[in-house]
Image (tube, grey):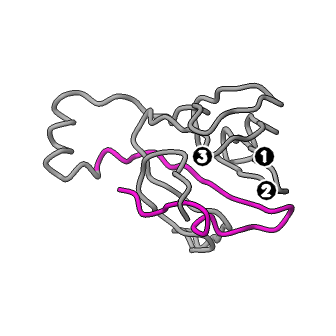
């Protein structure tokens, strides 16, 4: 996988790994910083965006070739249905709030991991079949 992740973050859970409740999902979860910008990893058409079940704000991108990229967990979503976005185009923002100076200094002392308080879920499908995103995306991010 060489495509850039849609957000800077740390891999929390790989495809089909159990979460704390034992649930397994075909996508991956990334820990991100509050207000991190989420971008399109490749040129694609926005096929859906809005609230969906317990996933919160969801965006579905169609890059072509029968693939769909589902991104969930953003607080704010940009773009319109049917819009074609370029690789690197902003798709939305993660939730959370900007920390104060004291919190910044504490998290810097702790290696910065305390700042990754938001979670982005990403799932890739070819037709209706889930595809492990690690096969496509560079998942070794910090």
Residue 139 included in the magenta stretch of the image: yes
Which structural element holds mark 2? strand
Residue 68 or residue 119, whichever sits in front: 68
Against 80, residue 109 (above or below) is below
Mark nearer the N terminus (2 vs 3): 3
How far apart are the alpha carbons under marks 3 and 1? 11 Å
Q: How many marks?
A: 3
Is 7 part of what is drawn in magenta?
Answer: no
The residue range painted magenta reads 114-142
Spot occupied by residue 51 in the image (x, y as percentages of width and height): 73, 37
Which numbered circle lies on residue 41? 3
At label 3, counting other C-alpha atoms closer than 10 Å, the crowd grade (few under 14, some 14-19, many 20 or more) is many
Q: Which residue is more in the foreground, 50 or 122?
A: 122
Which one is earlier in the sequence, the residue at label 1 or at label 2? 1
Proximity of marks 3 and 1: CB atoms separated by less than 8 Å: no
How many other residues sit within 10 Å of disc 1, few (<14), some (14-19) or many (≥20)?
A: many
Query: Residue visible at 42% across and 63% down?
Result: 140
Q: Residue at x 41, y 57 (%)?
A: 10
Q: Position of residue 141 (x, y in %)?
A: 40, 57
Q: Residues within 10 Å of mark 2 (few under 14, many from 20)?
A: some
What residue is disc 1 on? 62
Q: Which residue is mark 2?
A: 67
- Measuring from the top left, give residue 90's x and y in whole percent: 57, 31
Nearer the observer, 111 or 24: 111
């Amino acid at each position: 996988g060489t495509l850039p992740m849609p957000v800077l973050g740390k891999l929390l859970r790989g495809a089909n790994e159990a979460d704390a409740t034992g649930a397994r999902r075909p996508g991956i979860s990334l820990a991100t910083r509050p207000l991190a910008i989420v971008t399109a990893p490749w040129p694609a058409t926005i096929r859906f965006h809005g609230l969906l079940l317990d996933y919160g704000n969801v965006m579905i991108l169609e890059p072509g070739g029968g693939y769909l990229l589902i991104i969930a967990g953003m607080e704010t979503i940009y773009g319109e249905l049917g819009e074609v976005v370029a690789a690197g185009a902003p798709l939305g923002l993660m939730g959370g709030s900007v920390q104060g100076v004291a919190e910044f200094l504490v998290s810097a002392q702790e290696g910065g991991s305390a700042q990754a308080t938001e979670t982005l879920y990403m799932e890739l499908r070819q037709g209706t079949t889930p595809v492990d995103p690690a096969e496509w995306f560079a998942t070794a991010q910090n």
